[in-house]
Amino acid sequence: MAIIILSRFEKLEELLFCLAEEGVRGATVVESSGMAKVLGREGGRFFQSLHLYIPDREENRTIFTVVPDEQVPLVERVLTEVVGDLSDPDTAVLFCVPVGYTAGLGEKK
């Protein structure tokens, strides 16, 4: 499963469209907020004392998509094309976790 935390959520539709064009069959999108943003917004002195750059964005989007291992580089390429270099701040984070079992993805068993 590829999990994308999309800081540039204005790029959400473009990203989903491009992923679909490349053969990604589906995804689930959830509104989310990062820890630094929540603690900064809630008056968290720890993060404020670190003088962290906390963008004005109040939220981001977390995208879950179950893809075969061989599609992970494709997901990363499309994500980078849409939002830019992932090492730049305030773009996106991509990580993957193995999936041991699936049902309901439209495949016949």
Image (cartoon, rainbow, N blue to C red):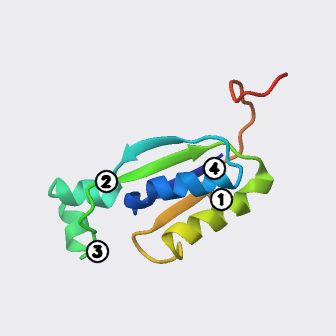
Residue 87: x and y in percent read: 52, 76
Spatial CA span between label 2 and label 1: 22 Å
**Residue drawn at x 39%, y 70% as measured from the top left:** 90
Of labels 4 and 1, earlier in sequence is: 4
Question: Which amino acid is tagged 1?
Answer: Val
Contact? badges 1 and 3 (CB < 8 Å):
no
Quickly name the residue at label 3. Answer: 53
Spatial CA span between label 4 and label 3: 33 Å
Crowding around mark 4 (Cα neighbors within 10 Å: few <14, some 14 to 19, many 20+) is: few
Residue 23: x and y in percent read: 71, 50
Left or right position of 42 against 92 = left
**Residue drawn at x 20%, y 72% as measured from the top left:** 49
Of labels 1 and 3, earlier in sequence is: 3
Quickly name the residue at label 4. Answer: 20
**Residue drawn at x 67%, y 42% as measured from the top left:** 25
Crowding around mark 2 (Cα neighbors within 10 Å: few <14, some 14 to 19, many 20+) is: some
